[in-house]
Amino acid sequence: MTTPTATSRARSTADDRRYEAIVVGGGHNGLVNGAYLARSGLRTLILERRHLVGGAAITEELRPGFWFTTFSYALSLLRPDIIQDLELTRHGFMPLLMPSSFAPGEDGDYLLLTRDRDENLREIARHSPHDADAWEAYHHDLDRVLQAIKPLFDMVPPDIFSDDPEELLALAALGSRFRRMERRVLHNAVRLLTGSAADFLDGYFESELLKGYLASSSIIGSKLGPRSQGSGLVLLYHVIGEHDGAFGSWAFHKGGNGGFTQVLARAAESFGAEIRLESTVERVITRKGRATGVALADGSEYQSDIVVSALDPRRTFLELVEPRELPTDLVDDIRRYRFQGTSSKVNFALDGLPRFPALGDRTDQFRGFTNIGPSIDYLEHAYDDAKYGWYSQRPYIDCAIQSTIDPDMAPPGKHVMSSFIQYTPYRLRESDWDAERQNLGDTVQRTLEGHFPGFSDLVLQREVVTPLDIERTVGLSEGNIFAGELLAPQMFFFRPAPGWSQYRTPIDGYYQCGSGTHPGGCVIGAPGKLAAGQILKDVAARPKRR
Amino acid sequence: MIRTTPFHPRTSALNETGLWQHWSGHLAAARYQASEKFEYFAVRNSAGIFDTSPLYKYRIHGPDAERFLGGVLARDIRSCRPGQAQYTLWCDDRGFIVEDGVVLRHGPDEFVLTAAEPNLAWFGDRIGRQRVRIEEISDDHGVLAVQGPASREILASLVPEVERLPYFGLTRAAIAGRPVTISRTGYTGDLGYEIWAGRGDALTVWDCLIQASEGRGVIPIGLLALYMLRIEAGLLLLDVDFESSRFAWTDEQRSTPLELGLGWMLKGIESDDRAFIGRRALLRERADRTSRWAFTGLLVDWHDYNRIYDEAGLIPPRRHVPVQEEMFVYEPHGGQVGYATSFMYSPMLQRHIALARVRPDLASPGSEVRLEVAVNHRYEYVRAQTARNPLYDPPRKTA
């Protein structure tokens, strides 16, 4: 699963160091971008700092036979046209179904949702007959909003600061799309895009457990509570995925998200892209305001008229190039761009499946996400800790025992469990993550033990990944999993900065394609794809050389 | 009274849905759990177990058995050596298909043939003076299909010979001390095997198999998952993709092997001396190029499918449960050129696919056609391309 894709031997001649496009960073967006560029015929090089591609979407065998999804752990938002365009199914794309979702409550009760609609309605009615009816209404309303805003995820944001007729036309088309929306759909869209998830959910449900379960999507990766304005947007973002035709449905890729990025790497290579591992790009070389190549930490250089940064905005604008080469406004905007990572992972190798007392010896509830976020109050209290510089003492946990879906992730009868943790702010008051790492692991394990008595006895190994570890290992600034918060002032027209949302930069030939660009984070691929479209448009418009 | 298979005491305990279909007079699980897609993925990613016992089974034996089968089966039975199995079919004298099935050759004069429908009379009436006996043994065996990438390792832990069993190979063995026949056959287009156990041994064999697959994500799968798998695998289903010539009312309802993409079964027919039923008609069809249809896979254009639904204000449905009904196929901007018989959203291929027949000149892969889909109660015509079957064909299937 982590087998490095083929790397070419060191090249020596100057000509061999010349490419038509160089992508800095082999995360999933860098791979998507490189694959599209190579597919269109550009001689493309993807440079990855680590010994494997994937960025935050990797799978590692941390213990013989046990494969950990160290960071990113599930798939939903990936734009489906990428699967088609890059022919990913030919290279092993395999989004396995997770047939259940499980949410333990605080009182020993639980909510267990499966693929059977009627069973789900009965299960919800157990908590609130009212909510069983509301469940359908909620999803209908939500799906209508999602269907209406979905095109935004597949388009380059129009430049609202431009007088270019093409941009004005795009803006008008966007406006007319909103204009055509039904009143109720538009209103719901605005409520979600600007308001809090808690307010929106209160409009439908009364069960705290159900609301906690649904509200969890509104906080993932974000320094927000479900009652914060703006959490509605995060909720919307997490359910826009239309995996196999159903909004909000998540899958587990064969071999984890590392298995997925290996598929991407194979696809990119099949189009002719070259991937070089253990190649740290130190800086982008520029001449007279134009990108001309990259310089690596080992002193070597590669030339190209097109350089694409798949790194986050801070690295793209403040580290790979000299800030003095950029407009002051942009530098200020990027300095003010919010990262403030707040999520961690605690991954476990387990000797067997945990038991949940109310379900006896049943274990099929673990074939999907297990959501430890039993009420909006619980989530909000967990956030309170983070507001004041500490990690949640009763954290929100999103678990996935992935070996129940893909048995190849662990030896027969054994399991791997990914646990996504919130809130764990990057900056801790009067301490740091090197000091708190194992304490966080203990806090998480204690919380899990509370729901699944005997859990600790099953633990064969534990891996704690703090925001600091995410930053150090993956390079995501402050450990923000989205390469920048999903806040309204950092979205669409403004991602990553006003005037620079179309994947270009002030330096000719230098582009951006990471999750810090529109539409944003998660394993979505849209930034990589949309950026490639812009680059290819620019290439086509270039004056032909004689 | 509906009957049950020898595995029913186990399968009924595992069927959480209570959904059963009737298959040849037996209860067959439609799906065991809430999601047939989960069962489908078990086969593509680990292994699934399917109770295929309701198939009709005929023992055909005697000194003239080979000669007899050579005369009724369209595929040359002589190329199926003892210890091998063969996918085959039988035609009427006009070259129309009566049915298809798998024949297992246990010895020089010893065969077992499976079929979806009763065929005892069809075969029995064609013995004449040959020294052959046909017995129906449908109820004597329980048959389990173990299909998927993990199937070899699991079965080899019980029967080491399985490790080396070639595609369509056959071996006699013992599981839990009970005699079984294991064939490397199946209806999923994946690596897989079928285990034949005596009726009285079925539960012992089941228990042993389940124990051997413990902790590997192996689950029983129902008919819905099987249908998904067989469409990806380009495998035909009687009464869906074709009709038996015996019971068809018109020739429009009938198909020849050449029209169903099974021309490869007639290998050597031009030069060999096999006198099988339908031979002359098929030779003529081939020589005169009178096939009315060519069988093909269809790959639906993802972007066009999405566009049609988006414009209609709908979320593009991606239903993986097969539509096993006719859908018409058209030329771009033209008339009808064929029809699809099985249609589904393929999770492995991430697009809609179909099994179809088209006018022979459109048979070459990549031909542009349109498939009708009903959108908002009106037909829309979505772009599709013909493609060679099987649409999903992992190398492990035959490796």
Image (cartoon, grey):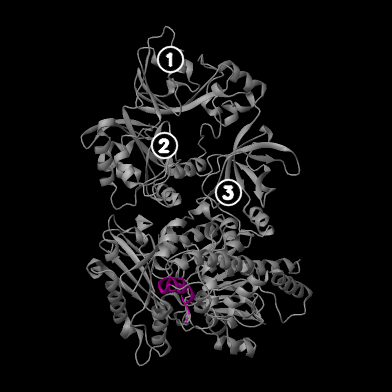
Nearer the N terminus, badge 2 or badge 3? 2
Few, some or many residues within 10 Å of mark 1 (<14, 14–19, 20+) = some
- The numbered dot on residue A166 is none
Magenta: main secondary structure equals helix
Q: Determine if marks 1 and 2 fall on one subunit.
A: yes
The answer to whether the residue labelled 2 contacts the one labelled 3, judged by CB atoms less than 8 Å apart, is no
Nearer the N terminus, badge 3 or badge 1? 1
Placement of the N terminus of chain B among the 4 image quadrants: top left
**Mark 1 or 2, which is nearer the eye?**
1
Judging from the image, what secondary structure is the residue with disc 3 in?
strand
> Callout 1: residue from which chain?
B
Q: Which residue lies furthest to the right in this view?
A: A165
**Mark 3 or 1, which is nearer the eye?**
1
Give the residue type that dot 1 points to: Gly
Disc 3 designates what residue?
Answer: B352
Disc 1 designates what residue?
Answer: B124
> Callout 3: residue from which chain?
B
Q: Which residue lies furthest to the left in this view?
A: B177
Disc 2 designates what residue?
Answer: B186
Nearer the N terminus, badge 1 or badge 2? 1
Q: Which residue is drawn at 51% across and 60% down?
A: A264
Placement of the C terminus of chain B among the 4 image quadrants: top left
Q: Determine if marks 2 and 3 fall on one subunit.
A: yes
Residue A62 at x, y percent in the picture: 32, 66
Residue A12 in sight: no
